[in-house]
Image (spheres, rainbow, N blue to C red):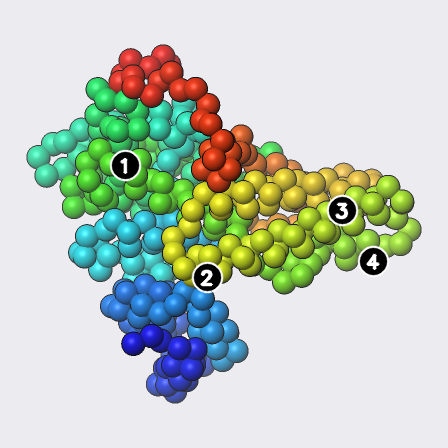
Amino acid sequence: MTVTAEDLTRQVGEFLAAHDPASTDRLEFLRARFDAGLAWIHFPAGLGGQNAPRALQSVVDTAFAEAGAPDNDPRRIGIGLGMAAPTILAFGTPEQRERYLRPLWTGEEVWCQLFSEPGAGSDLAALGTRAVRDGDDWIVTGQKVWTSGAHEAQWAILVTRTDPDVPKHQGMTYFLCDMTAPGVEVRPLRQITGEAEFNEVFLTEVRIPDTQRLGAVGEGWKVAQTTLMNERVAIGGHVLPREGGLIGIVAKTWRDRPELRTPELRDRLVKHWVEAETLRLAGTRLRQQLAAGAPGPEGSAMKVAFSELNQALTGLEVELLGEEGLAYDDWTFRRPAIVDFTGREAGYRYLRAKGNSIEGGTSEILRNIIAERVLGLPSEPRVDKDVAWKDLPR
């Protein structure tokens, strides 16, 4: 039987009657909401959902928000929600789904992503972190880089090299890594903003049980593709209200500070306003497509457009503010849990936006994906396609 919006509204009402947000402990409330199938409503019953249409998620979220119910702090646990959860759902065993999804959604366990390496950033399949079988365990050694939130994470999604004797895409295996395990070391990477939301992670003979392997041995690339497709939608596919995000900040400055205006800046602002509105509508369409199935390569286009628009808008804001735009309020070294583009000044936004075209897949790689998988253009020549990973030049 198909779940309707009316069904969900009734269920939320009954849930709130039994769990008063004002008097129920926050974590207890979130756990109960998950168990009631009102977390990810499109997930299976028993895993936070009830196999309902994904498009109806907003019905549930809006009803809880209007009742003043606590949320799961989605910005803090975005990697878990946007990348780990859909991958575990797609490839996890029943035991893995049961173990990881509930504390992931409630925010009890924070996740990070151990994919990129110093010698394998954009070319993820070239990674060299080794996992060697040892009985019922795997021994993992290597280095990962640009890991957001690793300093707060309890778990990580990890891709490793398990067979160096086959071509690079074939010898990879995917794991769920305990970030508190012996041999895991997290070091901060201080960025141009002065903060260190990113980290480098060193894995030295980390023992991972085979029960924490996600997918089959050697099929890590296949599993990772699910993660990456969801990542790009999570970064670039947010649905915002009109003038939401950075365009709203710049437009407000334009309206409030007429003395800063010039004809050239006006032309650029109007151009970016149109681009922001186009991106917003495209994001709405992408979310509607997701309601019918898993994300595809179209999310890469959203992510490229999001990155370029953010960089253009923050540059425009700095120019609009003139000397004020060159100021920077605080270079104090911090390791934040989230990236807050709206809570700081123009200088911070300008510097932080530079990373948008790198994180979540570089714009260069994403353009290749768009060309090949969306537009159907011929692939670039690949001389390493049939070469064993161990024979590749490094």
Marks 3 and 1, how far apart at CA: 42 Å
Q: Are marks 3 and 1 in contact (CB under 8 Å)?
A: no
In front: label 4 or label 3 = 3
Callout 1 amino acid: Gly
Res. 188 in view: no
In front: label 4 or label 1 = 1
Q: Is 101 left, or right, of 237 in this rendering?
A: left
Q: Quadrant of residue 120?
A: top left
In front: label 3 or label 1 = 3
Q: Which residue is mark 1?
A: 220
Secondary structure found at label 3: helix
Crowd tier of the residue under label 2, counting other residues whose Cα lies within 10 Å: few below 14, some 14–19, many 20 or above? few
Marks 3 and 2, how far apart at CA: 34 Å
Marks 4 and 1, how far apart at CA: 51 Å
Secondary structure found at label 2: loop
- Nearest to N terminus: mark 4 or mark 1: 1
Q: Nearer the viewer, residue 210 or 367?
A: 367
Q: Image point 60% across, 59% down: which residue?
A: 240
Residue 73: mark: 2
How far across and down, in percent of the image, does residue 218 sit?
Answer: 22, 33
Residue 271: mark: 3
Q: Is 188 left, or right, of 346 in this rendering?
A: left
In front: label 3 or label 2 = 3
How far across and down, in percent of the image, does residue 164 sit?
Answer: 24, 21
Res. 323 in view: yes
Question: In this rendering, is residue 182 above or below 76?
Answer: above
Secondary structure found at label 1: helix
Q: Which residue is mark 4?
A: 255
Callout 3 amino acid: Lys
Q: Where, quadrant-wise, is the C terminus in this rendering?
A: top left
Callout 4 amino acid: Arg
